[in-house]
Image (cartoon, rainbow, N blue to C red):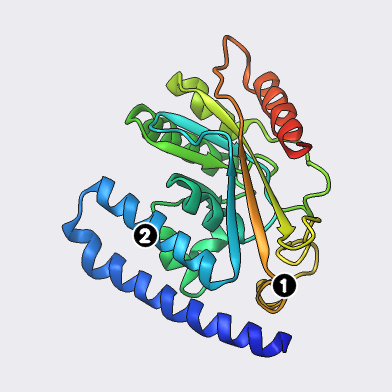
Amino acid sequence: MNSLRAAWRLGRAVLHALAGLGIILFVFPRRSELQRNAHVQAWALKMLTLLGIRLELHGHPPASGPMLLVANHISWLDILVMHAARHCRFVAKAEVRHWPLIGRLATGGGTLYIERESRRDAMRVVHHMAESLKRGEIVAVFPEGTTSDGQDLLPFHANLIQAAISADAPAQPVALSFLDTATRRTNLAPCYVGDDTLAQSLWRTLGGPPITAVVRYGTPRKAGGKGRREWAAELRSAVDDLRRH
């Protein structure tokens, strides 16, 4: 039954992903930025439904930018979940650009890509993030730099936080978690860590029981003269507090 459920959900998800690609190629060129953002959010909400994932929101997503969303990182699902909650522009590892279909969709959604190992590339991305924030956009980052199982919070890298300081923009902590819908216990199926492949994580998620993706938004705050490392530590503490609620 689990395999049948997974195959059914996967088939519908692939069709929806192809429909999304069609929207990017043929509809986006004729739409305004606000209309494109609305398309992305509606598409993400429907994709979660097709995957058997319920979205649960706590707190208040930003109504408008500029805003830097600072979130913990658990799964390949994180970007989809945050898009469904509130469209934002993501900073993601460069490998995502080359993932079949997913990469094209991420690019169409306005994702900025960063080469993790390159300090020069980090400076380039910070510059583009700052420019986006100055234009009044909502940008989202995962300062842990990699995924975890969600049980603990890794240290935050401060480099990307510099963008909000440079743009004099506020940052809002965001905590993500995945729960078994029936029991409300932590569900590890969506985790994408260690030796996991994307295919393994996807199949676990699709074949398992219904999942609730929980997004908790904290209170926006500004640096207030803090350096990036001090502010990153403060934001990490705020995300950790949200995770424990």
Q: Position of residue 77 (x, y in %)?
A: 60, 60
Q: Is residue 189 above or below residue 229?
A: below
Res. 108 mark:
2
Q: Position of residue 237 (x, y in %)?
A: 75, 27
For the N terminus, the image quarter is bottom right
Which marked residue is nearer to the observer: mark 1 or mark 2? 1
Q: Residue tagged by mark 1?
A: 209
Residue ID at (34%, 50%): 37
- Identify the residue at horizontal 52%, vertical 58% (top origin): 80
N-terminal of the pair, mark 1 or mark 2, is 2
Residue farthest to the top, as pictured: 225
Residue at the limit of the structure toward the front, as seen here: 182
The spot of residue 138 in percent (x, y) is: 43, 37
Location of the C terminus by quadrant is top right
Instruction: Quadrant for residue 222, please give it.
Output: top right
Q: What secondary structure is marked by label 1?
A: loop
Mark-to-mark CA distance, 1 and 2 = 31 Å
The amino acid marked with disc number 1 is: Pro
Residue located at (68% from left, 64% from top): 211
Image-based side of 86 in relation to 137, left or right: right
Nearer to me, 110 or 22? 22
Residue 98 seen? no
Q: For the residues labelled 1 and 2, say whether their Cβ atoms are less than 8 Å apart.
A: no
In the image, what residue occupies the spot 50% across and 48% down? 85
